[in-house]
Amino acid sequence: MTLHATEPAAATDAVLDREETISRDELEALQLSRLQHTVAYAYDRVPLYKRKFDEHGVHPTDLRELADLGKFPFTTKEDLRLEYPFGMFAVPQHEVARIHASSGTTGRATVVGYTKKDLADWAKLVARSLRASGVRPGMKVHNAYGYGLFTGGMGAHAGAEALGCTVIPISGGQTERQITLIQDFKPDAILATPTYLLTIADAMMKQGIDPASTSLKYAVLGAEPWTEEMRHELEVTMNIKACDIYGLSEVMGPGVAGEAVETQDGSHIWEDHFRPEIIDAFDPTKVLGDGEHGELVFTSLTKEALPIIRYRTKDLTRLLPGTARPAHRRMGRITGRSDDMIILRGVNLFPSQIEEIALRIPELSPHFQLELTRPEGQRMDQLTVKIERRESVTVEGVASAAKVLQQQIKIHVGSSCTVSVVEPGSLERSNGKLRRIYDMRPKA
Ligand code: DLL
């Protein structure tokens, strides 16, 4: 195996999993048999599912075709919290090979478990995602997703190993050290959240290192919403190809979906393991068609330790036809999470909309945060966009850029806001998933 920097491999040279190349008909037949098994397995083994199916008046034998899935009840984060810690597990504890959990910052942690087979499937799907995004066996992979209970670090690690890469398990944080190791170890690919990669690029520039001059050629980015504008920013600044990877702990972790480098048109959902649906977030009885925007819902098809039926992700997106992997549908970019939506004087707004608009204004940097306040004595909420100027911009340039941003937000989002352009380096930098919204309104 060569430890020299590898030339980027052509996107078509990879050997794909058989399931990546099967026809849609074959895939749907596989989904149906796996789905029938999963609902029966969950009903028999997890009391919560038995209770919910019974209350809902459905039985696993009611699932005769894929569309019948819509008859089954949803599972929510709240269900996992109520069953804390191990109530959702479908296997005895000694068969659980690993546990991960959400941080629990917004409530009780949600705990997920994996059998040995689940871990092998997970690694296979992350490997598939990385390969789709341009990573090849023998490449050095710098893994800056956080290790620990968060699924990002260990999930990405196992996938890169399964693909046959040399993994550098640096985890998140310690940015100076990350930069030293990137320079010394010369990795081909980096795995990180988009905002953390931005932090690394920014810190390189501060040290006088041109981020475009490193050995990195590929980045596989996820765990938080990001836009095409951010992709462009990172690709140009770092001279890399940046692809998306999507996932969530309750469904598996990273690798539920991955993007192909040759098309860069959204992540393909690995539908041999997960059946996606889009529902109307406000009227969940409505299952929407492909192309329609709504909330993403997943049912696992192969999981043993934690089968998950119709899990409401709160992620807002739409399903699109497969391209690079024709049988597997793609998901559009996640515009946001339904619980991250700012409702400002009746107008719905997501941080990604601000990112999209701000990054089209050359004087402004991608470093911004949104502050929500309700000034004393007023009933109206106020939004302030704090955004750093680019280093090269003059004071006059900043004033007009602020005005443009304010106008564009008014035109495209419909909200009036205040824009405050701040000094480069003055806003908090990401170490992983970046917090964009600071809600300072008095609690009701
Ligand atoms: O963030 C898993 C992951 C790790 C995915 C590393 C990709 C890379 P959770 O901590 O459970 O798991 O958070 C899941 O993060 O419901 C989305 O809201 C968001 N998210 C994950 N990937 C993307 C993405 C991991 N590519 C939640 N684009 C999900 C937008 C994403 N949002």
Image (tube, rainbow, N blue to C red):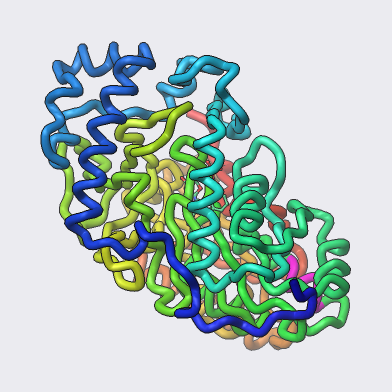
Please report the residue visible at 75 percent of the width from the left and 52 percent of the height from the top: 171
Residue 381 on the magenta span: no
In-front residue for pair 107/370 = 107
Image spot of residue 420 (x, y percent)? 61, 67
Placement of the N terminus among the 4 image quadrants: bottom right
Residue 203 on the magenta span: yes
In-front residue for pair 257/92 = 92
The correct choice, above or below, for 381 with respect to 132 in the image is above
- Left or right position of 369 against 295: right
Please report the residue visible at 70 percent of the width from the left and 80 percent of the height from the top: 6
The correct choice, above or below, for 98 with respect to 365 in the image is above
Image spot of residue 178 (x, y percent)? 82, 63
Please report the residue visible at 53 percent of the width from the left and 54 percent of the height from the top: 126
Image spot of residue 355 (x, y percent)? 51, 67
The correct choice, above or below, for 126 with respect to 286 in the image is below
In-front residue for pair 237/22 = 22
